[in-house]
Image (cartoon, helix red, strand yellow):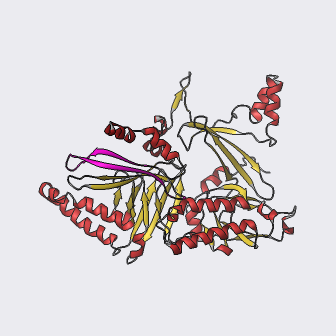
Amino acid sequence: MEGNAKNEQIVDVGSVVEAVSADDGDAPLYSLESLCMRCGENGITRFLLTLIPHFRKILLSAFECPHCGERNNEVQFAGEIQPRGCRYTLAIPSGEQKMLNRQVVKSESATIKIPELDFEIPPEAQRGSLSTVEGILMRAGDELQALQEERKKVTPETADAIDQFLVKLRACATGESAITFILDDPAGNSFIENPFAPSSDPSLTIKFYERTPEQQASLGYLVDSTQIEGTRVDVLEGGEAVPTDQVRTEPHGSIGATAGHRAIAQSNSAEMAEALFRYTAPEEVMTFPSTCGACAAKCETRMFVTNIPYFQEVIVMASTCDICGYRNSELKPGGRIPEKGKKITLSVKNVNDLSRDVIKSDTASVKVPELDLELASGTLGGIVTTVEGLITRIGESLERVHGFTFGDSLDENSRSKWIDFKTRLNKLLSLEEAWTLILDDALANSFIAPATDDMKEDKQLAFEEYERSWEQNEELGLNDMDTSSAEVGSAPTNTSKIE
């Protein structure tokens, strides 16, 4: 009976789910008999559900076989998949042994690439590992070395080529050769340590991206096959093929000018009032098909163009998923690309300054000189918020991206550094001292609202235009942009004869 009770505890899925959802951190340790893949006997796998502070809920599993001594461990993420994928790029020069000691979390969906070696560690290899850069490279070398004796008997040429590759791989793992370490995770649950955090690391680049339908399918989401194969084409009765993913100018439901015209024609007074007075802006709301970023189901994105006073024309986009309830809104710049970049400097001195509206595009960098804080362009994406909201989002983003380093393994000096930075960041919102907020946007698509009707009368707000460098134009893809054909096509033609 005692043995049966123990087995019931092991397979109690409900208790496991409750432990994952609990926030008290007192999750029990589960043990389970499992087959040893080396000797064929039964070993013991132990599971521990825990929460890394400010990072993720994870499931730690450790297997040990008492018969042959085989041991391994694995990290799985028990929390949610992130809305976007992440790609970490770490440039490691030769001789920098310390950079190889950086902590790395590789989830079960992450891929590691070393372009210099044309080497890739797929998601199924070293899945769910918690290690360092050196540890991951050395483990990859050990796994390749494990079957070398068998390869030499079957295919000696392949074995010799792998021996030569292992020499290069171990040279990279010891810091003798310069490499680029790329960690790409569509689930967004992987991580490379930044020892300089919260300051930027010149050797580490972090990019967040939208997942493709193929990546959504690999993560277990339900994806329509037509999203992977391409645009589906429907055939009308007359035999004309029409792609179903075309933009539909007729607004969704009763939104926009077209719905108002239809309501008037049908003499439906209730629908007419709802259609005409739901939005104060006269612009028509367009709707086009898209894919939910959370569950990959088909949904619709609504879009309309409007003008912001003192700023420019912008495109407002909003998506709502009826399947999972996910909602997302975005602001995109409209019109042509400005010839110059723009730097906006705001001196924050009172509570009213914290309530100023802020538009930060995805090409803008954020600086707070008093904190030695700098966020590169692309961080936080494009957002519409206030000065207070921007600082709050910065603190949350730093904890999410670098929060793994807040754990028990952090040394006391680094811990005190983080605590001091967090305290100083909170002081910005309490306005104990005046501070400066700088938005530097190479495409001039960011904006901070003035406190006066005339922008020139606002002495705390300064705008500075500058010529973009060649490197900035290259990063934005402007150097290779050729608009000559578009200019020729849009040029007016005058065929009338002037006498």
Tell me the residue at 80%/24% (across/down): 265
Does 364 appear above or below 96? above
Write the residue at 81% across / 70% down. Answer: 460
Q: Is residue 69 left or right of residue 207?
A: left
Magenta span covers which residues?
28-54
Identify the residue at image location x=81%, y=67%: 350
Q: Position of residue 222 (x, y in %)?
A: 48, 37
Residue 264 occupies which quadrant of the picture? top right
Residue 261 percent across, percent down from the top left: 79, 30
- Foreground: 451 or 286? 451
Position of residue 413 measured from the top left corner of the image (x, y, whole percent)? 52, 75
Vertical relation: 272 (above or below) 24: above
Total marks shown come to 0
Residue 351: say if magenta: no
What residue appears at the point 73 percent right and 71 percent down from the top-left corner?
A: 436
Q: Is residue 4 visible?
A: yes
